[in-house]
Image: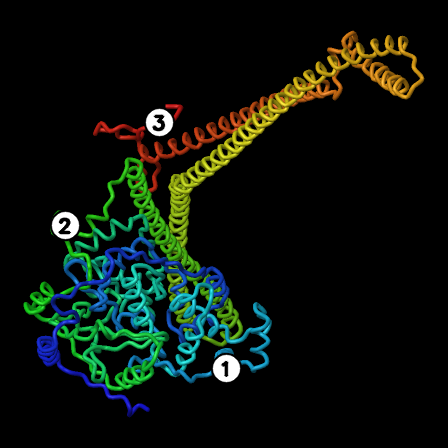
Amino acid sequence: MENEFLCKVEDNAAVRAWSEKLQSEKGDSLAEGYVSELQGFTRINVAQNELQELRDVWASWDEGTKQLFYQNYGDISYLLDIRVDKHLFRGMVQFWNSAYKCFTFGEVDLVPTMEEYTALLRCPRVQVRKAYARVFNSQTFVKKLISISGMSEPWVTARIQQKGDSKYERKRVDILALSIYGLVIFPKALRHVDESVIDLFERLEKGITPVPAILAETFRSLSTCRKTGEGRFIGCAQLLMVWFHGHFWKVDKISYRVFSENYSPLKEEAAIQRREDISEEKWMEILQNLKEGDIEWRAYWMVPDEIMYRCGNFDWVPLLEIWGATGYTPLLALRQYKSRQFVPTTHGLAQCEFSFKGAHYKKKVRELSDAWKQTRWMKRLAVGAMITPEYDRWFKKRVNDNVPRSSLENTRPIMEQLQIAPSELEIIKQDFEKKSSELEKKIEQLEEEKMHLKLDADVQRSEAEKWRKGKTKAEEDLDSLKTDYKKLRVSMRTAGLGKTSEQWRHEIREEKTKADRWKKKFQKAQARNEDLEKSLSENRNEQGELRARVVELEKSLYQYRNRNTALELRASLSKIEEMKGRIEELEASLQNCEMRIQFSEAKEDCWKKQLHQAQDQIRNRDYVMGEAITQIREVADYLQALAVQANVLSAKYKLESDRGQELALLLKKIRTLGIRAKFYFNLETNENLPNTHPYGTRKKTEAMDKKLERLEQMQKEMQEQMQAQVQEQLAKIQQKMRDQMLESQKNMMEELTRLLTNRPDKGKGPMADVGNNNGDPLYPPGFTPVNV
């Protein structure tokens, strides 16, 4: 397989001549007269997956498991901790040049390259010259999961049906890496891992590099959003953010750690706190007016080497990914390699992009895959100016695809535009932090001095121990001399009886000389012993002084640490924020009570309207009933008169004929009606009539009025009671919070006053205030303590 790959390294001058000649013959990516169809503003969605569970899993692993992860998949785990600035990302998208596959910021072109992304990921198993090409007759989803997890097919099928069961979890490293690839690097569907990602992940064990696929998806997603004017970015936003910060923040000195094998750019970027308070409009203004001097052309974590500039018969580098393909030309960004920039070949870049849909795309995939078997590399050159004159002329006259151009009016460097005027409180805070840092340096010096004193005390102690051992040895020698002398006396008594006087005198003289010699040795040992005791006492005195000095240093260190009240200030500020939150909650509850009261009042008005309507209806009915009763009374009067006439006629005519009987029957009926009409006639004379009604509506009306009056009175009492309770509770809480805020403010100002007025002198206690000679106020406006 290795023999199938052909890699050729060419000279920089030869590549430059080839590129300029090909560009003059074929032309640019866009011809003159091209009219862009892109919209002026792209609304892009940068929604990301929730990654807290993956962070928890990573944090629970031991160091051995993490090292195994690094060895297999590089530094992709640090992508979990990198934040995406949405304002910056949306501002960057507006400057994506789809025709040249690069970012055009003002007067410069920048593009993420394969070498830069490879340096960021730091995967030791990756082979740069082996790119990913999707196999369309690949295994099923279950087979892929079997190969990744290392389990049997029944186990995988059961795990798919029983989601969330981690009892038989194995190969945790591979599963976490797959999750990062599916949820962070290729987040096509939120909270899901696409099946195509598994195909790419399965091929990583063969040593292929995922960088071309990551770049291709980044470029395709940016171009798609620019063409449609909206959409969701489905590339790796975290890697793009790290790449951007590597080129847009000037580095004065490069740390030696960059050249270490264990240095991780992603780890360092994850630990840096970036500003996120810059608006999208501000970023667009900054990026639109960028100059060459504002760019850090070579990222500080990038070590330049040979540059891959084309593959096969293509004039640029084709990029295959899991859902489509595109291309880019690294010759457009030679300054990012610290090499001289010349005119790149860009013909065909605008038409190179396609997706894995429709007909004939498999043939294109095979052509791109075969092209990666013949890669061409270029040696970089860093002499003379950064750009050639031909490139300068070409950049000014080329046709771009609706990219905002720079405005030369009032342009300022990027760092100057990002500066914000600090407030008085921030100035005081900066001074406080500066003094705290100075105190910390002094504390470190005192600790270092304390350590040296301890070392000196140990040396003195070791020397005193040495003198003590010498004294003990001298005493032992003296004892041995005394013992030898006694033995000699005994031997003289026992063995010297036959000697002459001369011999005895000679031996006596010799013994005297020996005794004198031993006496001198004894005196020397005694003098040496006295010197040792004297030096031991001096060492003990010095040791006592050193101990007193150490105690004094510890006391001064304790005083300095007590003066550092940054934690207390933060605690008081957090208490103030908590009080503000409680005030907001109480205000919200008060607003809720007021809304409930307004709702009750509105309900009461509605009940009153219904009552008035019912009273109006009752009055109308009373009026109709009164009219009806009046008419009935008139009829009853008429029937009464008819009954009187019928009595008269019945007394006058008593006939036995048929007509007489009919007339008598008629008169009888009239009398009956007259009797019935007496009830209605008696209604006029009834004294209780005005207080009654046939339907009893007046009593009901009066009862309803009384109930409504009681209801209104109860509602009014409840409102007054509720308002009184809420106001009383709110007044208590406000008073309590005001007291706490005043107390915390008083403590904070006392600490600030003490730190601003007291200056320590090398651990010997605070110095007196030298006065405020510049006439500035002692306290910032609005922060004067109560007791001052």
Residue 215 lies in what quarter of the image? bottom left
Q: Secondary structure at mark 2?
A: loop
> Which tag is nearer the camera, tag 3 or tag 1?
1
- Tag 1: Cα neighbours inside 10 Å, few (<14), some, or many (≥20)? few
Residue 598 rendering spot, x and y as whole percentages: 53, 28
Frontmost residue, 288 versus 499: 288
Q: Secondary structure at mark 1?
A: helix
> Which tag is nearer the camera, tag 2 or tag 1?
1
Q: Is residue 701 left or right of residue 12?
A: right
Q: Using the image, determine if residue 572 lies above or below residue 353.
A: above
Residue 319 lies in what quarter of the image? bottom left
- Separation of residues labelled 3 and 1 (CA atoms): 73 Å
Please name the amino acid that badge 2 sits on: Thr
Residue 416 visible at all: yes
Which numbered marker is on residue 411?
Answer: 2
Find the residue positioned furthest to the right: 656
Residue 362 lies in what quarter of the image? bottom left
Frontmost residue, 297 versus 493: 297
Frontmost residue, 140 versus 390: 140
Q: Using the image, determine if residue 213 lies above or below residue 760.
A: below
User: Mark 1 highlights which residue?
Assistant: 143
Q: Secondary structure at mark 3?
A: loop
Residue 152 rendering spot, x and y as whole percentages: 56, 82
User: Mark 3 highlights which residue?
Assistant: 784
